[in-house]
Image (cartoon, grey):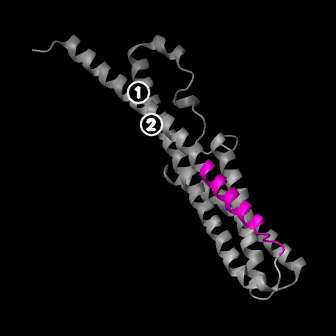
Amino acid sequence: MPTKSNITNASNDILIAEYEYIANSALQANEDRARVASFYLVAVGSLVAALFSAQLFNMNEAFIELNFVYSGLFLMLTILGGLTVIQLARLRAAWYESMTALNQIKEYFISKDKGLAKAFRWRESSMPLLYKRNSLSYQQTIEVAILSGLMFGAAVYFFLFGIGFYSRFYSWMLALAGAVLSMAAHLSIYKYFLLQKRK
């Protein structure tokens, strides 16, 4: 028959294994976040470099019909940017949930041994905020939002030329307005999907 000591040791082993699993989950969320942002930056950079090498902005009359194609490509990159922002929000939320779970285990052990309270810097009361504007996750989101906004501005610009709107000044103004609105929308999407999980 198992003794109380054996049961206690088994319980501690389970908690330690759970702690290590959650810590690895948090690490994986951070690594995935870096990969997601890098993938979008590479995708945008590759396409823009290819279009510039094809002398995108030196189009003559023979290439006017390609305006809709370019607009569609830039719109696709805008949509990919939105999906990237959602992924960044979900990964930040996953990291935060892991930290919350780790803190729950810490609090349990502290309740058993008050001396452990001095060993932990992060506890439930001192955790960083989920939505934190100076976090790495938010800064990566800003990068993606800026690039995605520029992609949407380019999509607007080429669409206007595709429909025969040839005023360069107003085309640039509308493209700039579209870029700014798209950036703001991406940051709002990030906040919405990040905080949605906590409701």
Q: Secondary structure at mark 2?
A: helix
Residue 46 painted magenta = yes
User: Magenta stretch mostly in which secondary structure?
Assistant: helix
What residue is shown at x 52% (from left), y 15% (from top)? 119
Q: Quadrant of residue 51?
A: bottom right
Q: CA distance from mark 1 to mark 2?
A: 9 Å
In the rendered image, residue 187 lying in the magenta stretch gets the answer: no
Taking 68 as reference, is 90 left or right? Answer: left
Q: Position of residue 153 (x, y in %)?
A: 75, 69
Q: Position of residue 135 (x, y in %)?
A: 66, 40
Residue at left offset 21%, top offset 17%? 7
Placement of 24 over or under 109, stated as above or below: below
Residue type, numbered disc 2: Ser
Q: Earlier in the sequence, mark 1 or mark 2?
A: 1
Magenta range is 38-58
Residue 103, percent from left and from top:
47, 29
Q: Residues within 10 Å of mark 1 (few under 14, many from 20)?
A: few
- For numbered disc 1, what is the local secondary structure? helix
In this rendering, the answer to whether 6 lies above or below 42 is above
The residue nearer to you, when weighing 142 against 69, is: 69
Q: Which residue is mark 1?
A: 20
What number of labels is visible? 2
Residue 44: x %, y % from top left:
67, 59
* Residue drawn where x is 20% and y is 13% of the image: 4
Residue position for label 2: 25
- The reply, left or right, for residue 75 in relation to residue 116 is right
Residue sitting farthest toward the bottom: 164
Q: Closer to the camera, 198 or 83?
A: 83
Q: Amino acid at mark 1?
A: Glu
> Please, which residue is most extreme toward the right here?
169
